[in-house]
Amino acid sequence: MRGVFIATFFMLLCALQPLCAAEPEGACLELSTKEIDLGDLFLDDSKQVYRLTFRNVGDVPLVITEVRTSCACTTVQHDRRKVMPGEQGVLTITFDPRKASMGMLYRVLQIHSTSRGGVEHVTLKANILE
C-alpha cells in the first residue's frame, strides 16, 4: 500500500511541476506593421521620416541588436536599450528620395533582435516620380 502511495505522489508531483516552475519562453517582437507605403514621392522631395512602433509580447527583456537596410536611401535609428515585457519601443526610419532611383521601389529592413524569431522583415515601398 505504501508503494502505491509513493508512486501516486511522484506521478502527481511530475504532473504539477510545469505549473510551478514555468520556464521563460523568451522575448517576442511584435511590429505595428510589416509594410510601410510612402506613396508617390518626387526625386527632389525632402527626406521622409516614419516611426515604426513595436512591442515586446514575450516574458523576458528584448533588445534590438541591429537593423539592416537594402539601400543607402534608407537609414534606421534605434536604441539598444532593453524593452521589458509589455513595453513598447520605436524605430525611426528615414527615407531619402534623392538617393533612390525612379519608379516603384521596394526596400527591405531586417530587424535583428533577441526575440525568439531572431529576424523580422519590414518592406518599405514608394513610387519615385521625376
Image (spheres, rainbow, N blue to C red):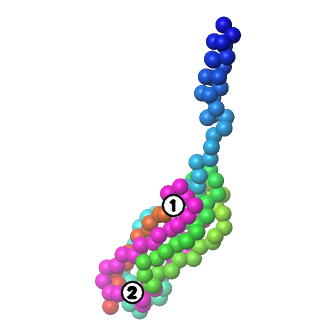
Q: Eyeballing the image, is 62 above or below 68?
A: above
Q: Give, as a single range, the part of the protein colored magenta.
A: 89-117
Q: Nearer the viewer, residue 45 or 63?
A: 63
Q: Earlier in the sequence, mark 1 or mark 2?
A: 2
Say the numbered circle drawn on residue 118: 1
Q: Does 108 sit left or right of 8 as displayed?
A: left
Report the number of discs. 2
Query: Disc 2 residue type?
Result: Ala
Residue at left 64%, top 61%?
Answer: 83
Q: Helix, strand, or loop for circle 2? A: loop
Could you say which is closer to the camera, residue 105 or residue 7?
7
Which residue in the structure is indicated by mark 2?
A: 100
Q: Quadrant of residue 10?
A: top right
Q: Measure the alpha-carbon separation of dots 1 and 2.
A: 29 Å
Q: Secondary structure at mark 1?
A: loop
x and y percent of residue 66 in the render?
55, 71
- Graded by Cα atoms within 10 Å as few (under 14), some (14 to 19) or many (20 or more), the crowding at tag 2 reads some
Kindly indicate the quadrant of the structure image that contains residue 73. Answer: bottom left
Q: Residue furthest front?
A: 3
With respect to residue 24, does 10 lie above or below?
A: above
Q: Is residue 45 left or right of residue 118?
A: left
Task: Indicate the amino acid at tag 1.
Answer: Gly
Q: Does the image show residue 39?
A: no
Per the image, is 67 magenta?
no
On the image, the x and y values in percent for residue 91 come to 55, 71
The reply to whether residue 92 is in sight is yes
x, y percentage for residue 13? Answer: 65, 26
